Structure formats: C-alpha cells, structure tokens
Amino acid sequence: MRPVVKASLHYLALAIVSILWLIPVYAMIVNGFKSNLEVLSSPVLSPPTSLSLTAYITVFNALAKPLINSLIVVIPTSFISAFLGAMGAYFFYTLSYSFSKFSSAISDVLFSLIALATFIPYQATLIPLTRLIVSMGILDTYIGIIFAMLIFYIPTGALLMSMFVSVIPRSLIEAAKVDGTGDLKIFMKIVFPLSMPGFISTLIFIIIQSWNNFFIPLILVTTPNMRLVSVAVQSYTGGYGTLYNDTFAAAMLASVIPLAIFIFLGRYFIRGLIALGGGGKGV
Amino acid sequence: MKKGTIILVIPTAIFSAILLYLVIWNAVISFTNWSLLNPKISFVGLQTYFSVIRTFQFSNSILHSLELSASLVAIGNILGILFAGLLYFLSSNKARSVFLSIIIYPLAISMAVNALIWLWLFNINIGIDWLLVRIGLPQFPWLSSTSTMFPSLILVSIWAYTGIAALFYLAGFMNIDKSVIEAARLDGASAFKILYKLLIPNSFNSFIIATALLFLFSFRIFSLPYILSGGPTNIFLQTAVVYMYYLFTVEFFSQATAVATIITVIASVIIIPYALIIIRRWIRK
C-alpha cells in the first residue's frame, strides 16, 4: 500500500471511532436547543431547525438549587481530599526509606486499605454508612454528604498522590533532614510545592468523580431541597411525561462543569487516571 | 519514627479506619436476622447467607454483575489494544491527544447522565433506530426486548470504559524502548506486525491494570442499570449492587448486608493483590 493511502485509512478508522464515541454528546448538545414543538416530531439524531432556549429555561429553574448544592459539596470535598491525601502520600514516601519489617507491614496494610477505599463498590457500605451518618445527626446536611465522600476520596487522594510524590528526588529531602527539618515542615516547604502538578491532577480527578457521584447523595439526602445535581437529573428519566429536549438540557447542565474541566484541563484528569494504574509516566 | 511524621498520616488513617469499621460492621450484621420483620437483632450464623443465596434474585443479579464485568474485561481489553495501536502510530502528538480525549470523555460525565442520554438514544422510534431504518437496516429493540436489554447495557458500559483500557495500553506502548521499534521499522516491519510482535507482548503490565480496573469499575456500576432498568420490577438489568440497594429500601437489612459482604469479598480479591503488587512496586521501585 502507498503511504498516503495507509495514512488516510488510519485517520479514517480513528474518525469512525470518534464519530461513534461522540454521538451521545452530540445528542446532548443539539437536543437541548429544540423547541417543545420540535421534539414531538423530530428524531434525536437530527439537529434543531432553530435554536430555542425553552428547555434550558424550564430545566434551569429545577436544577439551579441542585447545581449550587453540588458546588457546596464538591469544592471542599476535593480540596480536603487532595491535600490530606498528599500528606498521607508523603508519609508512605518516608516509610519507603526505612526498611524495617514492621514499617513495611504497616504500609502494606494501610496501602491495601486505601486501595480498598478507592475501588470498593461503595454501595456495599450502604447500611453502616447511612447508620453512621444518622447517628452523627448529619443526615440530609452538606456536612453529612461531605463527610461520607471524604471517607472514600481522602484514601483516593492518598493513592493518587503516592504516585506523584514517589518521583521527587530523595536527595532533596535528605538534605533537608540533615539540616534537622521536621517532616511536616518538609512536606509544606518541599514536597507539596514540588508535587503541585500531581496535586492538580488529583484535585481534578476527585472534583470530577465527586461531582458525578450518584450513590452517596442518593442515600444521604432525604429532602428535595438538598438534592445534588447528579441525583436531580434522574427525575428526567424518559417516560411519557418528559419531553426529551428537557432531558438533554438537564443532562447538559449537570455535565457542563465536568465537561468544561475535561476540555480545558483534560491532561491533568488523564494523568490522574494513569496514576490509578500505578504509574505517572507516559502519554 | 518521629511524632511529626505520624501526624501526616493521621487524616488518611482515620478515614481509612472508618471505612474498615463500616465494612466490618456490615459483615457482622450479615450474621444476624435484622429486618423490618425482626427489629430485634439476634445472631443466626450463616442462615441469612443460605437464605439469600438460594433466592432467584440473588443468583440472577450476581450473574448479571459477573457477566457485565467479564464482557467489559474481554471487549474492553481487545478494543483498548486496538485503539491504543491506532493512537500509538499517529505521528502527531496533538492528534493523538485529541483522539485520546474523545474516547476518554465518557468517564468525565456522570453515569446517571450517560444513562439518561442512552435511554433516548435507545428509543425505538426516535433514537438510533431512526437512523438505522433510514439507511435500510432493520430496527433493533435495544431496551424494549428482554433478550437485548442486557447487551445494550453492556454496550453503554463499553462505550464508557474502553477509553481507560486504551489509555493504559497506550501508556504501556509509550514506555517501550523507541529504538527497538525504529529498528523493526527499518527492517520493513508493518505497523500491524510491530503491534503484534513487539508492543502487545511487552505490555503485560497494562493488561493486568486494565483488567483489574475494568473489573472493579464495572462491578460497581450502579446508576446505569438503576436508571436504564426503570425500577425494581425489571430483573433483566438487575446487578448485584442494584439488588442490594432494593433489599435495603424494603428494609431487609441483614439480607442486604449479606449481599454487600459477598460483593466486598469479590472486589477485595482483585483490589488487595492490585494494591500490593502494582502500586507498591511503583512506589518503592
């Protein structure tokens, strides 16, 4: 085959995959702009004949409060998780200096625990989690949702940050140790600033994950006023009563923040994903 | 170790301990008969497990979970290798990151939102079928037939999670020594041959990571089957986590904790080796 033909086939294959992958987001964008009249006659895949904001106006009134609730929960959750996780990660880094059997056993147990917290089907803790939150008197409050999310996302932060902290050169930290600097100070002055790109990756990964978390707000919120956006969109699940332009407008409003972050800071999100696989290099 | 060092890990340790407490508490309750009918808790040993395991709903839902995970692991790995190969041989870094972003973006959107969008795409009159009919293909019943419902769910999860497998394979391919690839190129090896003979055999790590994570992510998918199925009466899309949630909502607490414990055990079998081998190796080098 001639190289030109080969290259075009290569791009053609990628173009087909891309088109298939983009169908849902295309549907989400075009259908939110259809008028109530148009959705009754036009299929999902056809673009609107004229731009109408009716669906967005209807849906925005219902989703404004959930959107604010989500922001109130997600911002502290992600910053606290990434920062405290980074501290924990530096602890693991210091543990890897000492080769004693005891400390490596501790690090194995803690590591398995934070991996468990990161990957466990968190639905499996449904009953004790609900009970804990009820007994603390924080069911249906922002604090309750944030607290529950921290249980899962602080370990996630520690797991991801461990990957990024592990590449900091040892000599820097050893030099500071020789000068008699304490670990907390080394963390604040050296480790944290040096791992800033990793911190941003971890932060963005947790923002997107916690924004999209459906299950925790589903079980820990009991009044409509406290609903987060990921759960609020569920009321648009098809059926005969729903116009589908409303569904897609709701989907768009619920996704606009994670999608915007993904479009502008996607490489940080991707680095977070790679760190889950146990490596910070490559791509 | 100095006191100052321990302070660093206290927050992570506390929250990990809470999680451990939740998991253990859950396991303890699974040995009782606590439910709406038995508000007074008493220990019954493995009885709850025996009664749960015998039910049709349990075997049905756990089978669905395992089928979903197995399909996603198999298809996700194959497509992941294929897509990573296509991306690897792109000469432009910019094009590579654009295409990579396109196959990864479903991970940035909530599964609840994904489910919502696919519900309409699967609509038999106005969804994808409208296009299929227009280009002369037969309609496909997606969610409206009991035999095609579950494959449709698998399809959405493949769309959502293939990107992560492709990412791990691409990262693996990129770490392989460039000079070996160049040498093979000079010898006139085709891209397909390089992929087959050099890249794939050298990405065993990527295979392990992709498999572990695809399994774990698909095993805990909740909102997708929860929303696509439309409710507890649709057992054709019921996975283990969804079934457990319904057991909880009807206040069959000990049954729900028993199912939850089984789910936790299955997940831990993958998570703990993953943590001890893959991650520790990376951190300690």
Image (cartoon, rainbow, N blue to C red):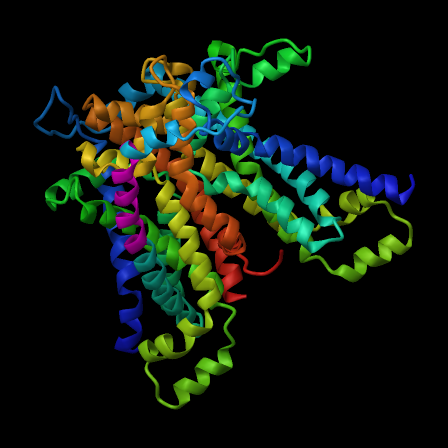
Q: Is residue A30 above or below residue A201?
A: above
Left or right, B10 with reference to B105: left
> Could one spot residue B174 in this view of the protein?
yes
The residue under the point 80% across, 58% down is B180
* Image quadrant in which you'd find residue B243: top left
**Residue A168's spot in the image, x, y percent?**
50, 73
Query: Is-magenta flag for residue B107?
Result: no
For the stretch drawn in magenta, what is the main secondary structure?
Answer: helix
Q: From where the camera sits, is residue B28 visible?
A: no
Residue in front for this viewpoint, B187 or B22: B187
State whether residue A69 is above or below residue B59.
below
> Which residue ends up furthest to the left in the rendered image?
B40
Using the image as rendered, state which of residue B196 and residue B156 is in the foreground.
Answer: B156
In the displayed orientation, state which residue is furthest to the bottom.
A179
Magenta segment: does it hold A66? Answer: yes
Range covered by the magenta-colored residues: A62-77
Q: Nearer the viewer, residue B37 or A234?
A: A234
Q: Quadrant of the C terminus of chain A?
A: bottom right
In screen coordinates, is A41 left or right of B74?
left
Q: Quadrant of the N terminus of chain A?
A: top right
Q: Residue at x 13, y 22 (%)?
A: B36
Q: Position of residue A163 (x, y in %)?
A: 48, 61
Q: Residue at x 91, y 50 (%)?
A: B188
- Quarter-of-image position of residue A187: bottom left
Q: Position of residue A62 (x, y in %)?
A: 27, 32
